[in-house]
Amino acid sequence: MSSNKGGFWRKVAGAFVEIDEPAAPPSTADLPPNDAEETAALLAQLGGAPPTPPQAPPAAPPLPVTDIIENRPFSDIYAQAGVPTVHQTAEQLLTILDGLAAMPKEACRLAVKKMDEADDRWTIADVQLDAENKRRALQSAVDGLKARVATEEHSAIAERENADKLLTEAESAIQAQIAQLTQELTEFRAAAAEKKAAADAQLANVREVAHRESARIESELFRLSRITAFFETTPFNAPPPLPPRS
């Protein structure tokens, strides 16, 4: 029985030593982009012609550009952080532990210890240090992403405040222009009303003066017509009376 156990541990240790590459970490599937609803306002063409309907739906707006690189290999992160290369990596030990997952925890620890004793090229402390170095590198990457988001938040706040300031200034200037134009329009309306009133008064005055003068002249015409009527043999017919003044 002891020889069989020794053969089992040698096989397990050999399997651990022969692993050359760390198991690939599970990849996260890309999330589908959110469907963005776009409202396309069609402007009426000059002359009142109806707008031409689009032949194809509008394309989605391009995503903002960012300097964050997604899906970087962990090996690149480790290399950038200066994690040293070791003979047996933390990923390799994780692969072995996954294979021994059905065994009790203490049995797994004993198996790993036997592997360590069977190969003098690595120690459990080396694997633990490798895992810790990689954890620090990954945490640093996460902290960097958080700092990048914080920087972007500050930039966005500044941009929003600047946009609000420009909007306030534009609204103030436009409202001032509207008030000035409204005052000018009121003055133009008053001037137009005065001109119309003056034109109406002028017309009424001309009509009245013309009526009086016409009556005076026609009265003189009638008076002078008496001379002609005096010498006529036919009875004198008086002219019809003048129409009443309007």
Image (tube, rainbow, N blue to C red):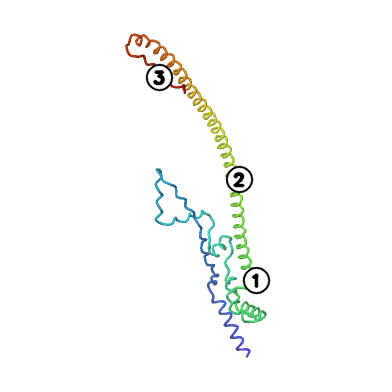
Residue 72 image point, x, y percent: 53, 62
Say which element carries label 2: helix
Give the number of the disc on residue 69. none
Residue 25 is drawn in which quadrant?
A: bottom right
Residue depicted at 41% across the width and 57% down the height: 56
* Earlier-in-chain disc, 2 versus 1: 1
CA gap between label 3 and label 1 equals 138 Å
Q: Identity of the amino acid at label 1?
A: Ala
Which callout, 2 or 1, points to the residue nearer the camera? 2
The crowd level at tag 1 (other Cα within 10 Å; few <14, some 14-19, many 20+) is few
| Image quadrant where one finds the N terminus | bottom right
Residue 186 image point, x, y percent: 54, 31
The crowd level at tag 3 (other Cα within 10 Å; few <14, some 14-19, many 20+) is few
Say which element carries label 3: loop
Residue 78 image point, x, y percent: 57, 63
Q: Identity of the amino acid at label 2?
A: Glu
Give the number of the disc on residue 125. 1
Q: Identity of the amino acid at label 3?
A: Pro
Say which element carries label 1: helix
Residue depicted at 33% across the width and 8% down the height: 231
Number of numbered discs: 3
Residue placed under numbered mark 3 in the picture: 240
Residue placed under numbered mark 2 in the picture: 161
Residue 113 image point, x, y percent: 64, 78
Name the one closer to the observer, 65 or 8: 65
- Kindly indicate whether the residue at mark 1 contacts the one at mark 3 (C-beta within 8 angstroms): no
* Earlier-in-chain disc, 3 versus 1: 1
Residue 15 is drawn in which quadrant?
A: bottom right
Residue 77 in the image: above or below residue 223: below
CA gap between label 3 and label 2 equals 88 Å
Residue 46 in the image: above or below residue 79: above
